[in-house]
Amino acid sequence: MSTPTVPLHIVVPTPAHSSAAPILSYAHDVPLPAGTLVRVPLGAREVLGITWDEPQGTGSELPQLRRVGAVLEGLAPLPAPWRRLVAFAARYYQRSLGEVALSALPPSLRELTADQLTRRLRRMPPGTPAPDAGAATVQTETSKIVVLSTDQQSAAAEIDAHPGPFLLFGSTGSGKTEVYLHAVQAALTRDPGAQALVLVPEINLTPQLEARFRERFDALWGASAIVSLHSAMTPAQRLKSWLAAHTGQARIVLGTRMAILASLPRLALIVVDEEHDASYKQQEGARYSARDLAVWRARDVGAKVILGSATPSLESWHASDPAVGRYQRLHMPARIGAGELPRLRLIDMSQQPRKAVFAPPLIAAITERVQRGEQCLVLLNRRGFAPVLHCGACGWKSDCPHCSATQVFHKSDRTLRCHHCGCASPVPRACPDCGNPDILTIGRGTEQLEEQLAQLLRNVITRERRAARVARIDADTTRARGALKAQLAQMHAGDVDVLVGTQMVAKGHDFRRVTLVAAVQPDGALFSSDFRAPERLFALLMQAGGRAGRDARYMQAQQSAPELWVQTWHPEHPLFAALRGHDYPAFATRQLAEREAAGMPPFSHQALLRADARTQEAAQDFLRAASEAARTAQLPGMDQVFLYPPVPLAVQRVANVERAQMLLESPHRGALQHLLAAWQPLLHAERTRHRAVVRWLIDVDPQAI
């Protein structure tokens, strides 16, 4: 007698933009609930799959099916809300369902067998029981009492009383983190099994945030109730945190954008800190926005969501306009402890000595602060010593052999490095083309600024009667494991007087002794072809300036006032007028008026179709053919979507692959989505006809064009 079989619909990791069906059918002895993890054969290999809800239009007769290899028992099925989130992300961002679903799981979970998973689950510590309301009250009363400011009390009361979504618009140093802590405690106290998800834009912000949360909640819910989830963790650590979140043992999950796809069965609150940050948009694979998915996920499960920033994205600011009414705007304009916001000091570089890296007035201000024992922060969003090496005799430049970009000069190890493909080579002793030994540098990076400042401050003595110390934090100095944590600890301990850094140090950090921040070379974004560049520059300068004067008591004791110095060739630019008054609403109003007149987001919706090919001509030919195919087929929504001609990317060649893109724009999000969904089969067909195309992708709601 043959063994009875039950057909199961299973999502497997099909390749990106594969023409294979998103859900495949397999046979098993018994039915399994949707969300169960299984091992199944796919081609010649065995992969992890997820049983899924039966797709619409499935026929009653199925061909001979391959059998499920093993069921990963002991792990509860992935819940329906998680499956809805994954399905929405795949549908909206035009990716394979299996690609999104399986990439949302920890890498080591995708490789484990059923027996290995069982052993892992046995090693997990037992969950910490949630305290009852009385115990929570007693613990709160015996712990450190936190007195909220008037602004914090108002914001917390609004969050407690209304469903949201909320845009928490608070100036730098206004205490937004304390509002997050209050909201998390309120949500988890109301429901003994509730979970909260707190997102930060960058990995280096998670340690200090975790420390704040543990200080507040370890005694209340136990150390195992708080976990972090980000890509810098080891595979074992990621699996442990993911399992804790999935089983409900972890009540608070802190993480970067990847954490938005974690399985949280009892999700009650999502916090997106620094919601304006472009790091929330994934730039590889499924190009999702964690911020936007947070809003969708909260609405789907009935959770509250708080988007917090001192410089909100213009999309969120527009959505919080009372006339639009999608978000509820909460305003916290005052700094904690009546601290003052930094005063803007603009330096007109046209009035400074020629080729000066630092204007003399800025050096005088830094010197004065260091002598008083205060700290300074110098910002330049470009690492390395110089962006280009150049021969004045023949015009040679340090071009990358594999990219249409230059190799950056790194003086510390005497190398030329491409920041796009990673190609590295030693610095030549003379010009490779003409033999001229006098090769010059063009432009400046953080390495050069550190060297110049160390030279300029070499005779400065601090209040502790020691020489001034200059340090640098960027992607080069923090490459080693634990390096960033050690460098930040030195800064907090006062062992560094002047810190030079990229945007890594411009947001989220609470440097209590920093009183002066200087932005050295910000003008490039003022006239960029990217319409989002002014928004990003304003946010960067506001966030960087917000590192100064955060400790009101320290500033009063020093009898000092915080300052933000900006070296610019265009001091009359309107952006600086808004920055001078810390007037984000005025800046946003101006920018939104310009975007509305130009029909740009948030008043329109965009997507990019990108092609990578062996030649630029092949890439653009594919895009033109795809555009013509869409027009010929009269795809749904075509009459409301404008397709621009294909153009090369700003860096059109990376690792010997030519890149081109085509912009799609529509005033209606639904029309754009209908067109993109219907376009997929035509794009697959065009790909088979254009053999020189290496890959293609769709980027919905792109953050860089």
Image (cartoon, rainbow, N blue to C red):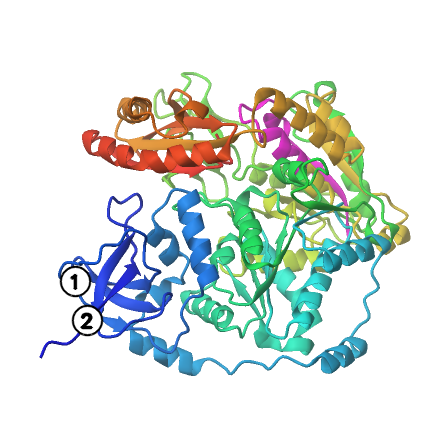
Asked if residue 3 is positioned above or below residue 396 in the image, the reply reads below
| Within-10-Å neighbours for mark 2: few <14, some 14–19, many 20+ | some
| Location of residue 304 (image quadrant) | bottom right
Does residue 277 appear in this view? yes
* Residue shown at the point (50%, 44%) measured from the top left: 281
Indicate the position of residue 405 as horizontal and vertical percent values: 41, 29
Mark 2 lies on a secondary structure that is loop
| 153 relative to 319 in the view: left or right | right
Outermost residue to the front: 60
Query: For the N terminus, which image quadrant?
Result: bottom left
* Residue shown at the point (56%, 36%) measured from the top left: 445
| 431 relative to 180 in the view: left or right | left
Q: Any mark on residue 631, and which? A: none
Q: Which residues are magenta?
A: 512-540
Indicate the position of residue 592 as horizontal and vertical percent values: 66, 28
Asked if residue 584 is positioned above or below residue 192 in the image, the reply reads above
Front residue (pair 558, 503): 503
Q: CA distance from mark 1 to mark 2?
A: 9 Å
| Within-10-Å neighbours for mark 1: few <14, some 14–19, many 20+ | some
Indicate the position of residue 172 as horizontal and vertical percent values: 74, 47
Q: Amino acid at mark 1?
A: Leu
The answer to whether marks 1 and 2 mark residues whose Cβ atoms lie closer than 8 Å is yes
Look at mark 2 in the image and give the residue it sits on: 5
Front residue (pair 414, 479): 479
N-terminal label among 1 and 2: 2
Q: Any mark on residue 65, and which? A: 1
Q: Is residue 29 magenta?
A: no
Q: Amino acid at mark 2?
A: Thr
* Residue shown at the point (26%, 49%) measured from the top left: 21
Mark 1 lies on a secondary structure that is loop
Indicate the position of residue 259 as horizontal and vertical percent values: 51, 58
| 564 relative to 522 in the view: left or right | right
